[in-house]
Image (tube, helix red, strand yellow):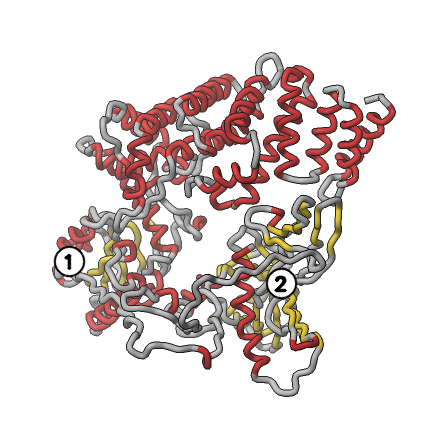
Amino acid sequence: MRNFIWSVSVFLCGIVLSFSQTKNIEKGTYLSTSKGQKIKLNLLDNNQYELVFYSGGYKIKGDSLIFAKNPSAQTNFDLSFKADKKAKNIKVLFKDPAYYSFYIGTQKGKEEVKYQRITDIKAKVDPEWTKTDAEFEIEKADFIYLVYEEYGGKTSVNKYALPKDVSEITINYELAVLGDLQIAGYFDKQTNELRISEKSGLNPLVFINEKDPQPVTKTPKVAPLESEVVSNWTYPGKDNTLLNDDFGSAVAVDTAAAIIDATISPPAYTKYDFKLKIEDNLKKAIESTKSASNKFLVVVVDSKNKSAKESFDNFVKEQETQTGYNMYDSYNALYDIYNYYLAGADDKKWLKNNKITSDPSIIILNGEGNQLAIAKSDLATQQYQFSYYGDFYRRLQRANAFLSINTILKNKKASDADLINAFNKAALLESSYDYEKEYTLSDPNSTEFVITKTALDQKEVAQSWKKLIEAHQKDKAVNMYLVETILKEIKNQGFTKQLFSTDRILNDTDFLAIDYVLKHSDEIESIRSGFNTKKGEIHSVGNPITEISDALQQNLYISQDGVSGEINREKVNALYKRIIASGKGNFDAYRNYFYYLSQTADKDGSSTTYLKEYNTYFDSTLAGTSPIEKLDTIFSTLDSSSSYSYDGWNMFKEYHSSTANTAAWAVVTNPLNANFLKDAIKWSEYSLVITKNSPYYLDTLAQLYYKDGQKQKAIETQTLAVKYLNDGVDGESANEMKEVLSKMQNGTY
């Protein structure tokens, strides 16, 4: 909520100033014409004003204030067309796509839609991004699809029918400045305060009725000598990178009030002067590439071109400039991913031995000198490919991972470190955007890159991995590259998934690998920060206990029925108990453990194990006074790798109320759990403290009261459940709640 208010206040600065320069302003209501929802400016009597950011409907239910969602526009895309019967293709002008995730799709009749990312198209037609807009052509089609993919996971897909003989399409997209607020309110009768927050969560805005006594405004004991508003405030040595980046709208200030000391000037921006080392022979070029784990060698063959050397040198200078931009003011190996070499007369033998006859051509080698890709093309044509951000780099990494593992498995003299490196390389692969094209060999006469394909035997790879894990069981010091590979593998994201696209349940090797991580968990936790920030490398090892518990939960999703599945579930249960008993069980471990137990009943059909474990956690962690403050304390200590550190406070709070209700509901529905009746009432009451007036939670509590003999209290609570029914409750559940109330009232429950 606080972030929202700040962003809106910054946005409105320009509005206030613009009115200060306007003549003949009349009292009344003014509406903004800015992108997004309308903002009202009310000019009142006595030189007073109001800025109204949001408006809409509301409902009052009990002590809760419920805000109605504002209707939103169907689409933010704006299209215009031009027609020309002679046009063979359609010209598209996409206005300022910037860095947002836009896609365009075309469809002929009922054929499959063919999608392309706008930034990928622009990278090909305008690799230097010299133009603000994206200009390109598409084939004639009956329909186009325009897609906007948001960071939060929501995606807007819009289908348009193309007019007959359309020759040009101009596309605009307006991002809404202000979206719909996800807020709710609650009136505190003890303090006469109305608290409004994101679903009544953390850090609420507090309001009091203007008719009630107002709090006394405190005057600062010490007043400042001067107060001023300074534009682009800085001091010597201050990092002003963010001031130069277009991450948001500039803040408008009254220049008459801005006072800047002329003796203090911001430090000049200095771009890192990156230089590529170009070797004079192929052997040195390969050796130089081998010394860097993330680099590939681009060998250029262009002997028939008299200006090949000049073109190559110009290309190298351009790559140095572009790479330097990524590095800002110091070297960063992350972006230094290619070495370049122009083949000469001395390389004819090497070209012949490798059956490279096309001239011009471009060959990509790894640090061992093995070929990963080749294109029958000149350098200028493929220039756009050689970027850290391009998908081609990911495709090369994948091809290299396949080749590296295959080479290591066939080399009986390969070292333990070589084997770990090969598995780690495969485990850290990113999904390629052009995945379907990756290993599809193109036309032999094509000028596009053909990626080397390496076949691997999955059983051979699994056996080698097993031997590696067994060999490290007695390690006294942890190998973080092995740990990282293990964590990826047990979460079904590692080399097995990357190389063979296979989902699988945890096996004996995985449990042995988990033992390795648990054994070294304290050391891993103490050094993982340094490992994750290792210069020139990319790692993201999270808290080992959280990583393991997440893997166990994922295993539950994909585990199969049968004897092997039963054995697996027993091992999973034993692992959870081991983690909890060790005292290392964090929130994520408990969360996954409770979910796991809730999905598996005891042999007698009860949920005794689940309810007993949950009750222990509840009494030790959640019970007592100030429940919100207790949750806030837990939330503030979450590890950055925890999913709830990203999902946010509201989801974290809702999880605890939902889990309490789930455990309580198990007592309502299963007579074998009757021994937990008193505890279940405690859990259910807690769920309603965290999430007020939930019909589902009220229904649970009412039925528990009734089973406990508190019939009048049960009827009153069930009456509230029916009272607070809303559109979020499905029809069947609503009818059941009403039926339960009727049975309680007539004594037939």
Distance Cα–Cα, label 1 vs label 2: 52 Å
Q: What is the x, y in percent for residue 310? A: 21, 73
* Mark whose residue sits in front, 1 or 2: 2
Mark with earlier residue (1, 2): 2
Query: Disc 1 marks which residue?
Result: 347
Give the label on residue 143, or none: 2
Q: In the rendered image of this protein, does residue 207 appear above or below residue 408? A: below
Q: Farthest residue toward the right?
A: 746
Question: Looking at the picture, which amino acid does disc 1 mark?
Answer: Asp
At label 2, the amino acid type is Phe
Residue sitting farthest toward the bottom: 23
Quarter holding the N terminus?
bottom right
Disc 1 element: helix
Secondary-structure class at tag 2: strand
Looking at the image, is 735 positioned above or below residue 133? above
Image spot of residue 181 (x, y percent): 62, 56
- The residue sitting at 63% across, 19% down in the picture is 676
Question: Residue drawn 33% across and 41% down?
Answer: 426
